[in-house]
Image (cartoon, rainbow, N blue to C red):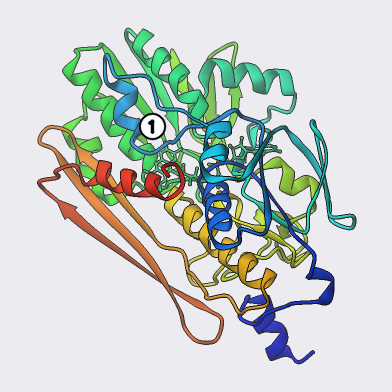
């Protein structure tokens, strides 16, 4: 095969209809998050003849979007849940509630707690795992206990109600929030959460302060509000990469400080979900060290190890020498789900798929009183030689009027609503 043809196939730009695919009808999607739900819904629509099975260990989808305000809103309605069984009935795909424990690429089969699941195409959208070993915590019971007591609720939105309850119980003292080193999911989310918590401490007269341990540069849209307006409520520690945690003494250590806390939202470094490590689908850096994230195409999201396997969403790895990673947002995961649905549907019917590149719009609240927000638009174009160019535009909105809720509703119409 020529290099050019190989590249076009790898990029999903040429049909790859091997005769062996002709009767291949089984698509299995692991992970019912923003990526997996979009893939399932769009595949059902685009390729009614395919069998589409969604597997998730959880019984329901919960969204992270708009959760930061909800966390500190007294009397807020319970956080919305969307049962997978109902979504599956609505859209006509099959749902299996199970833990996927292994991927057998050679046999094209998943090992799950509900038995083996053979596939012809596999879409992996399993999200992230937290790397507690980077903080010298290596045993599962201690990780479970740290998560129970002090989770920052960035791994699973199912953890949000418990975090809300912990905040409601916080009556004062030092409240620590650690930010993971980039890349991590939803880059502005920790700063927006910090702003809401600072506002809540101030307006409720809670005698506490929020200590932010941040290894990344502070997002400019939050500089004034966190460092000036809420200077009595916030202590911001820059270059603060956590090295270890001591649950008994309630401290974390960075290279510079030992930080004591009364309550904490601990967010260790993030990596691609466990399943991708098990399946051997993690990209190696130069020198062979694992990068922590998957190896997949930048345009077609096919795994480097197997063209029948797609990796989408937050688990995806390096895509560009220019900008590194796609932003780990729900909207990017959703677009990737749509893109792989188009590719599989086209491939199953012997057609060339149209390319659909990621894009993301993010409405971030930067001040509560007066209400202000910033809109972050991220888009991509193919330079023509397989390399992508990223454009990021930030626009200040001094008078928001529900753009964030309208955005979320439009997104949910794509994969949650009939
Ligand atoms: C606080 C916060 C606020 C955010 N706000 C926004 C926002 O406003 N807008 C936005 O676009 N994005 C936002 N995001 C980011 C968004 O939530 C993520 O980008 C999105 O969830 C990624 O989708 P995903 O499909 O990759 O993974 P996930 O949504 O994490 O889904 C992964 C699924 O896979 C399942 N799973 C994993 N492994 C297995 C296994 N082995 N067996 C069975 N099931 C498995 C999990 O149970 C889970 O349901 C926010 C994130 C956070 C933390």
Residue 206 appearing in the image: yes
- In the image, residue 410 above or below residue 78: below
Relative to 269, is 116 on the left or the right? Answer: right
Picture residue at 64% right of the left edge, 32% below the top: 132
Residue 261 appearing in the image: no
Q: Position of residue 311 (x, y in %)?
A: 65, 57
Nearer to the camera, 158 or 287: 158
- In the image, residue 134 above or below residue 263: below
| Residue at the outermost right position | 107
Nearer to the camera, 315 or 97: 97
Q: Position of residue 389 (x, y in %)?
A: 44, 75
Quadrant assignment for the N terminus: bottom right
Picture residue at 84% right of the left edge, 71% below the top: 20
Q: Position of residue 114 (x, y in %)?
A: 79, 32
For residue 373, what is the image quadrant? top left
Picture residue at 42% right of the left edge, 44% below the top: 418
- In the image, residue 17 above or below residue 166: below
Picture residue at 47% right of the left edge, 83% below the top: 383
Q: Position of residue 399 (x, y in %)?
A: 10, 46
| Mark 1 residue element | strand
User: How many residues crowd around disc 1 within 10 Å: few (fewer than 14), some, or many (20 or more)?
Assistant: many
From the image, tell me which residue sits under label 1. 212
- In the image, residue 261 above or below residue 378: above
């Amino acid at each position: 095969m020529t290099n050019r043809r190989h590249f076009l196939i790898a990029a999903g730009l040429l049909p790859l209809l091997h005769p062996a695919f002709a009767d291949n009808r089984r698509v299995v999607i692991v992970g019912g998050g923003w990526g997996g739900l979009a893939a399932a819904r769009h595949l059902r629509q685009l390729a009614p003849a395919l069998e589409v099975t969604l597997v998730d260990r959880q019984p329901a989808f919960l969204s992270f979007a708009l959760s930061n305000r909800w966390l500190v809103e007294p009397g807020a309605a319970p956080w919305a849940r969307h049962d997978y069984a109902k979504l599956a009935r609505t859209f006509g795909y099959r749902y299996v509630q199970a833990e996927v424990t292994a991927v057998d690429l050679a046999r094209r089969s998943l090992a799950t707690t509900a038995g083996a699941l053979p596939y012809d195409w596999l879409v992996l959208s399993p999200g992230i795992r937290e790397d507690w070993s980077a903080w010298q915590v290596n045993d599962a019971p201690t990780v479970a206990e740290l998560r129970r007591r002090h989770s920052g609720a960035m791994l699973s939105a199912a953890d949000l109600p418990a975090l809300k309850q912990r905040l409601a119980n916080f009556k004062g003292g030092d409240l620590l929030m650690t930010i993971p080193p980039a890349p991590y999911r939803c880059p502005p989310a920790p700063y927006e959460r910090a702003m809401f918590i600072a506002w809540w401490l101030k307006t409720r007269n809670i005698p506490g302060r929020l200590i932010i341990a941040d290894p990344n540069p502070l997002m400019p849209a939050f500089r004034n509000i966190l460092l000036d307006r809420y200077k009595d409520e916030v202590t911001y520690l820059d270059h603060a990469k956590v090295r270890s945690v001591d649950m008994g003494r309630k401290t974390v250590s960075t290279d510079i400080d030992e930080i004591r806390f009364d309550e904490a939202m601990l967010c260790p470094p993030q990596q691609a979900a466990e399943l991708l490590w098990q399946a051997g689908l993690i990209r190696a850096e130069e020198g062979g060290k694992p990068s922590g994230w998957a190896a997949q195409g930048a345009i077609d999201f096919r795994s480097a190890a197997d063209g029948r396997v797609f990796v989408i969403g937050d688990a995806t790895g390096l895509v560009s020498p220019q900008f590194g990673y796609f932003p780990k947002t729900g909207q990017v995961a959703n677009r990737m789900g749509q893109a792989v649905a188009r590719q599989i549907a086209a491939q199953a019917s012997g057609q060339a798929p149209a390319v659909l590149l990621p894009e993301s719009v993010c409405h971030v609240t930067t001040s509560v009183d007066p209400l202000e927000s910033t809109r972050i638009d991220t888009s991509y174009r193919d330079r023509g030689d397989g390399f992508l160019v990223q454009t990021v535009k930030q626009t200040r909105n001094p008078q928001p009027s529900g753009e964030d809720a309208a955005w979320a509703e439009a997104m949910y119409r794509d994969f949650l609503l009939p």
